[in-house]
Image (tube, rainbow, N blue to C red):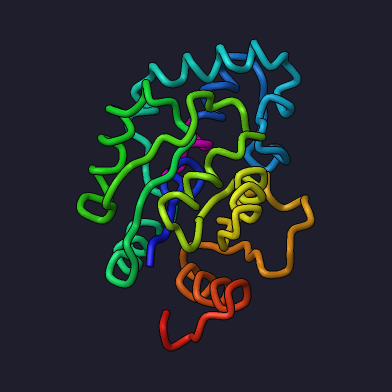
Amino acid sequence: MILGVDIDGVLLDFHTPCVAFLNAYFGKQVALRDIKQYDMWHAYQVSEEEFKKGVQAFFKMPAFSELRPLPGAVKGVRRLAKQYDLVVLTSRSPDLASITETNLHRYFDGCFQDIHHTTGNMWDVTSSRKGRFCRELGVACLLEDCVAYAKAALQEGIAVVLYKRPWNQYEQLPPFVRRTTWSKMERAIKRTLIRMNGLDHKLL
């Protein structure tokens, strides 16, 4: 059984160093808890274009290439890799492929069978391409933090578990979509697959 796993906000802590950088870049004092939408630019009260320039500047900083895992992610992924076939599904631009591989291999070497960049436009969170990638790859469940991508996967019949973040707490989702942390990820995946697909718990 294949699990698809997002990178930023699920495996790696992208947002803490990015927010710190953008605060200095824009002269703001935004806290992580202030980000209530996946499109972070709303929290900075700048134009979308200005925000994109700021994030592009962050991509060039050492902090981006040295992102650290979110709490419990390394241990959790290693446990999951013993039970499932894991693939990475990221909306990062393919231009960041080299840094992305370095990010992952530093902490998750040998855990993932492949890395898929699901879109050429990382800013388009309404894109359904991540959902289609899941279907084409035969992904049974997607671990994600973006509600829009979660909904795209659900439309393709893919089970979804959301890693609990401030920006995914405010939308109503189907009852079988669970928000959780890495400490409870294994149980959440199994329960979601059972509830959505009617799978026998003995097969999971």
Q: Position of residue 157 (x, y in %)?
A: 60, 60
Give the quarter of the image for residue 90: top left
Q: How many labels, in total?
A: 0
Q: Looking at the rendering, which quadrant does residue 186 occupy? A: bottom left
Q: Range of the magenta residues?
A: 12-17
Taking the spot 38% from the left edge, 61% from the top edge, the residue there is 2
Depth order, front residue of 126/81: 126
Residue 97 shown left or right of residue 148 in the figure: left
Residue drawn 79% across the image and 56% down it: 172
Q: Quadrant of the C terminus?
A: bottom left
Image location (x, y in percent) of residue 118: 46, 36
Q: Position of residue 16 (x, y in %)?
A: 51, 37
Q: Quadrant of the N terminus?
A: bottom left
Residue found 41% across the figure and 83% down from its top: 203
Compared to 1, does 135 lie above or below?
Answer: above
- For residue 82, side relative to residue 141 (left or right): left
Q: Residue at x 47, y 14 (%)?
A: 57
Q: Residue furthest left?
A: 110
Q: Residue furthest front?
A: 136
Q: Is residue 55 visible?
A: yes
Q: Is residue 203 magenta?
A: no
Q: Position of residue 176 (x, y in %)?
A: 67, 69
Vertical placement of residue 54 versus 143, above or below: above
Eyeballing the image, is 193 above or below 68? below
Residue 161 shows in this picture: no
